[in-house]
């Protein structure tokens, strides 16, 4: 397992309007606070940041979970309200516990399914020369 922190990206730039997305910035702020409060349960190895244009504007606020060597998950239609923040923090805990970010179809992510946009499998490249794993 990598020592790199897990990352949560929130779309903060609207490509349709060509301007900053205030709901995205609010979500970044609230999610950072909620994760700090959840450190005893979730861990402190998450970085939350805004990112330009995840290109999923038809789905409201979009959030992506990424960690070295793990599948990337994308969720849309996220609201900065208490329920969605709780779901995002709970998913962070679950995501951190999975060795490769994917627990198979039997493991549910806990969020309402309409928010799930997809999973991108971990892309692993192994160097034949020294066995170093890159992702």
Image (tube, rainbow, N blue to C red):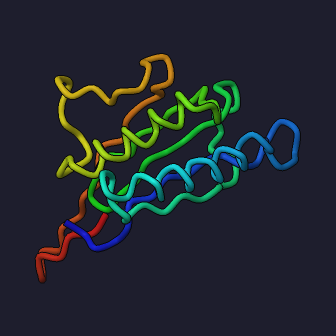
Q: Nearer the viewer, residue 49 or 86?
A: 86
Number of labels in the image equals 0
Q: Nearer the viewer, residue 115 or 53?
A: 115
Q: Position of residue 60 (x, y in %)?
A: 68, 29
Left or right placement of residue 124 versus residue 73 in this view: left
Quarter occupied by residue 103: top left
The residue sitting at the bottom extreme is: 130
Residue 133 in the image: above or below residue 6: below
Quarter occupied by residue 46: bottom left
Residue 36 in the image: above or below residue 94: below
Residue drawn where x is 27% and y is 58% of the image: 69
Residue drawn where x is 79% and y is 44% of the image: 21
Left or right placement of residue 135 versus residue 48 in this view: left
Left or right placement of residue 69 versus residue 84 in this view: left
Rendered-image quadrant of the N terminus: bottom left
Residue drawn where x is 72% and y is 50% of the image: 25
Q: Position of residue 40 (x, y in %)?
A: 32, 57
The residue sitting at the top extreme is: 114
Q: Position of residue 77 (x, y in %)?
A: 61, 26
Q: Nearer the viewer, residue 127 or 58?
A: 58
Rendered-image quadrant of the C terminus: bottom left
Residue drawn where x is 44% and y is 20% of the image: 112
Q: Position of residue 83 (x, y in %)?
A: 53, 28
């Amino acid at each position: 397992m990598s020592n790199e922190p897990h990352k949560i990206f929130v779309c903060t730039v609207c490509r349709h309007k060509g301007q900053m997305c205030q709901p995205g910035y609010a979500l970044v702020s609230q999610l950072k606070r909620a994760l700090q409060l959840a450190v005893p349960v979730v861990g402190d190895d998450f970085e939350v940041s805004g990112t330009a244009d995840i290109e999923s504007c038809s789905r409201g606020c979009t959030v992506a979970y990424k960690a070295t060597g793990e599948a990337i998950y994308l969720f849309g239609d996220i609201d900065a309200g208490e329920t969605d923040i709780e779901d995002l923090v709970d998913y962070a805990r679950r995501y951190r516990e999975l060795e490769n970010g994917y627990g198979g179809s039997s493991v549910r992510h806990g969020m309402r399914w309409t928010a799930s946009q997809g999973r991108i499998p971990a892309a692993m490249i192994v160097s034949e020369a020294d066995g170093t794993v890159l992702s």
